[in-house]
Image: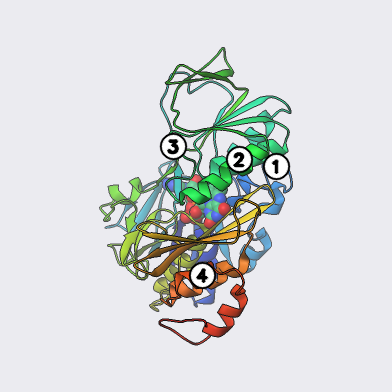
Amino acid sequence: MTKKCIIIGASHAAAQLTTSLRQGGWEGEILVIGDEPHLPYQRPPLSKAFLSGEKTAEDLVIRPATFYQKQDVQFRQDRVIEINREKQTVTLANGEELGYDKLALCMGSRVREINLPGCNLNGIHYLRNLADAESIKNNAAKDQHAVIVGGGYIGLETAASLRKLGMQVSVLEMEPRILKRVTAPEVSEFYHRLHTENGVQIINNISVSGFQGNSHVEKVVCADGSELPAHLVVIGVGVLPNTELAEASGLVVNNGIMVDEFCVTSDPNIVAAGDCTNKLSKIYDRRIRLESVPNATEQAKTAAASMCDSQKDFTTLPWFWSDQYELKLQIAGLSQGYDQIVVRGNRLTTQSFAVFYLKSGQLIAADCVNRPQEFLLSKKLIAENIAIPPEQLEDDSIPAKEILLRIAGKSGQLTFT
Ligand SMILES: Cc1cc2nc3c(=O)[nH]c(=O)nc-3n(C[C@H](O)[C@H](O)[C@H](O)COP(=O)(O)OP(=O)(O)OC[C@H]3O[C@@H](n4cnc5c(N)ncnc54)[C@H](O)[C@@H]3O)c2cc1C
């Protein structure tokens, strides 16, 4: 009898999983159930090139319908409301039950919502999916005021895109600096200046207490009594993993669905991949839940291998990127816990530099602004645990490419004389 695999969620992790399953020799049925009315599409451009009008919805599709047809992958637009692990079934919103042999949880994450007076007024948006991005774009109007609540990457990318559309943009951040959770003060300062130079007003140490307007938002009101005019508000205060279905079915969940190194959950017939998982990072020696496309893709490859009964862990060093204005920030690794910072290049006079984060002398992360070679170098140094003296990381006269060539095939401490 043909085996049946059901994938819940139809986004980055699911798109990779279908391909990797066929490549791994899965001959049975593959059914992807996703609640958005689209084939899997790229989410990162929603705050970047799609919002600023440089890309269309068609450009975002990860693979065309013909690709999935050739792979014999079925899609169904619906919402799964229950998993019964004993019966090996999932229940759809209309009550229909579907049986599985293997189940993959690729439910991703959803935006964290804020509950403040006036938060349901028209013109107040979150940004997670294509429909959100389309409605922000439709609501954007040249010379009108946009207020972004939250100075994280998505908020700042949205600010840059709305500036490109000619809006007057303010970013409100409750912390003393933007990007505080993820970067060093040097990087926050750089992005603060970049946005200010591009006409964005950034206000730190401020918290929103509500919104005012008739049916449409007109003002954002802050706890210190200040008010900002607003025709459009975008709230970007983080995401929450979609774990409720897993938890209700009895799977082990703790800040994400707990998976082993092969992306198998506490039920051997169920794998999970992407934003909704919590997995041990061998490099950082702790469990982490990551929100990034590379993570979703790599975990999906790992999960597919497990479903095809071959145990392979494809996950590598975490990495991320952010596009704001004409700058590309590439981030290698996770900087939490650093005790030293080294800056290569001049972040005050140029738009090309790298900030290296070290812990006990070992590189653990790097933020590389328009520095692709430093990004590649950092990935290698961190993943392979190669130590380089900080003063040599800092020395911009040694090209990163040269260091990369010199360390090819080497490991451990490396010095340059
Ligand atoms: C605006 C924006 C910008 C971003 N920029 C970057 C970036 O620059 N770089 C980067 O690496 N990452 C970026 N990310 C994060 C990245 O998009 C996510 O990490 C990635 O989408 C995770 O993929 P996923 O497949 O795990 O989950 P998701 O993309 O969250 O997809 C999960 C899907 O499952 C569906 N679903 C959930 N529950 C059910 C259910 N019960 N039944 C049916 N369907 C269900 C959801 O509706 C969704 O369609 C960005 C995200 C956003 C929103």
- Give the residue drawn at x 64%, y 68%: 70
Which tag, 2 or 4, sits closer to the chain's start?
A: 2
Outermost residue toward the front in this view:
417
* Disc 3 secondary structure class: loop
Crowdedness of circle 4 by 10 Å Cα count: few (<14), some, many (20+)?
many
Q: CA distance from mark 4 to mark 1?
A: 36 Å
| Residue 62 appears left or right of 17 | right
Q: Nearer the viewer, residue 246 or 348?
A: 348
| Residue 382 appears left or right of 43 | left
Q: 66 above or below 175?
A: below
Q: CA distance from mark 1 to mark 2?
A: 9 Å
**Coloration of the structure image:** rainbow
Q: CA distance from mark 2 to mark 4?
A: 32 Å
Residue 177 visible to an observer of this rendering: yes
Q: Nearer the viewer, residue 197 or 45?
A: 197
Which tag, 1 or 2, sits closer to the chain's start?
A: 1
Q: Are marks 2 and 3 in contact (CB under 8 Å)?
A: no
- Give amino acid for label 3: Pro
Is the residue marked 2 within 8 Å of ligand 1, measured from its CB? yes
* Disc 4 secondary structure class: helix
x, y percent for residue 142 = 74, 28
Q: CA distance from mark 2 to mark 3?
A: 20 Å
Task: Give the residue number, with chain letter if any, for mark 3.
Answer: 176
Crowdedness of circle 3 by 10 Å Cα count: few (<14), some, many (20+)?
few
Q: 403 above or below 79?
A: below
Q: Which quarter shows the N terminus?
A: bottom left
Task: Give the residue number, with chain letter if any, for mark 1.
Answer: 52
Task: Give the residue number, with chain letter if any, for mark 2.
Answer: 158
Task: Give the residue number, with chain letter if any, for mark 4.
Answer: 393
x, y percent for residue 372 = 62, 66
Which tag, 2 or 3, sits closer to the chain's start?
A: 2
Q: CA distance from mark 3 to mark 4?
A: 29 Å
